[in-house]
Amino acid sequence: MQVNELKLKHFRNYDQETFIFDPHINILIGNNAQGKTNVLEAIYLLSTTRSFRTHKIKELIQFESEFGFVEGQVESNKHDYDMRVVVSKQGKKAFINRKDIARTSDYIGYLNAILFVPEDLSLVKGSPSARRQLLDQEISKISPIYMYNITKYHKLLKERNAFLKMLKEQHKEGDLYLDVLSEQLAELSADLIKRRMDFVALLNEMSGTMYDYLSADEKLTVSYHTSYKEISKEAILAKYHKTYKRDIIYMSTVDGLHKDDLKFQLNNNDASLYASQGQQRSIVLAIKTALLEIVKKEIGEYPILLLDDVLSELDDQRKMKMMNLIDHKVQTFITTTSIEGMQHASIAKAKKIKISHGN
Ligand code: ATP
Ligand code: MG
């Protein structure tokens, strides 16, 4: 997949700008606060209809404008597409070939992107929610059904929690409607957890290979941790039934896949406790490069890769290996304040785009 052309209108600090990209490596160079990350954010928005920096879509609109948009000419093995995401005070709208696409799950997949931002380094030692988010986002990219079901799960969960609160207020210990909600959640959970487990098995295999290539010192393993002993609708429902009382007291669904976690281990040691800064960086790099291969395996072509300020943080050897991995396979967008010291042949050949004050 590749983005051949990108048009920004009233987006962040861009008034109006058009970029023509190279199919291989594009380097966005500029001083701080000039608009480099804004371009990556625009490409990510085009890919997912979301920003990786904010949930408030309004922030993307240029100051003092009513609306803004990002439009891209996207090429995949199958077709060429015109993709567009319009953001206004009312919200966002996504279009493929000028046709309004109402459901996000119908939009995702036309342009697949893997993003690596400096904040990703907290993936290893940070909160489980970031790791769950990684899982949900990455599986959604290759499976519209997963995306549809996880959205439905969270909607039902919210409904169940609100209902638990009502039951507590009415001093009740159960209700037919609680049975219905629990059954629907159990059915979705069994499906979603199985899909997560299959994905993590693939991620473990691929990221292990990548880690081995990037830093052969230890062995990386990735595993999925769930509180359920058996993954079936019946077993999950039985657990819900056993915990009605507790859930009503807490006014919250205490157990569930919304509490599950991804674990990283280096030579069988828990990386969240023991990994050094450099090891954390290598783990995240292995995960991100593994994701490139997983997308390729699942949908038949490589996604694009967005690297915000991360290449400059790698040591020379890892930088070299990273460039070897993506060389001529993956359209890549790299932001940096300077390309001094980047000495790979593909950097020399890359398209360099100078960014200054939103131009
Ligand atoms: P750094 O090297 O520091 O990461 P950068 O080039 O990546 O810098 P960006 O984050 O892309 O910088 O752009 C930041 C600039 O965009 C800031 O000057 C900020 O004020 C401006 N900006 C952000 N949102 C808007 C907006 N909605 N309207 C206008 N300008 C905005
Ligand atoms: Mg930036």
Image (cartoon, helix red, strand yellow):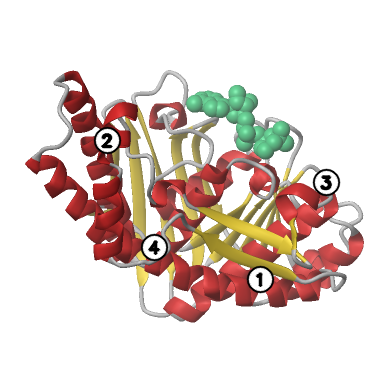
Question: For mark 4, what is the residue?
Answer: 193
Name which residue type carries label 4. Ile
Q: Nearer the viewer, mark 1 or mark 2?
A: 2
Above or below 280: residue 159: above
Q: Counting residues from the N terminus, which is met first, the one under dot 2 or under dot 3?
A: 2
Residues 173 and 78: in front is: 173
Q: In this orientation, does residue 182 appear?
A: yes
Q: Check if mark 1's residue and mark 3's residue have beta carbons within 8 Å.
A: no
Question: Which kind of residue does numbered mark 1 sit on?
Answer: Ser
In the figure, 215 relative to 341: above or below? below
The image's mark for residue 356 is: none
> Which mark is in front, 4 or 2?
2
The residue under the point 56% across, 45% down is 128
Please tell me how crowded label 4 is: few (under 14), some (14-19), or many (20+) other residues with Cα within 10 Å: many
Check the image and name the residue furthest to the left: 176
User: Crowding near pointer 3: few (<14 within 10 Å), some, many (20+)?
Assistant: few
Q: Residues within 10 Å of mark 2 (few under 14, many from 20)?
A: some
**Between residues 274 and 90, which one lies in front from this camera angle?**
274
Percent across and percent down for residue 249 are: 31, 27
Q: Earlier in the sequence, mark 1 or mark 2?
A: 1
Point out the tag, 1 or 4, that comes first from the N-terminus. Answer: 4
Q: Secondary structure at mark 3?
A: loop
Is the CB–ligand 1 distance for label 3 below 8 Å? no
Task: Name the residue: 69% across, 45% down.
Answer: 125
Please give the label number shown on residue 338.
Answer: 3
Q: Secondary structure at mark 1?
A: helix
Q: Which mark is residue 207?
A: 1
Left or right: 93 in relation to 300: left
Query: Closer to us: mark 3 or mark 4?
Result: 4
Q: For the point 65% across and 31% down, which residue is it?
A: 357
Q: What residue sits right under mark 2 in the picture?
A: 245
Q: Is residue 25 left or right of residue 10?
A: right
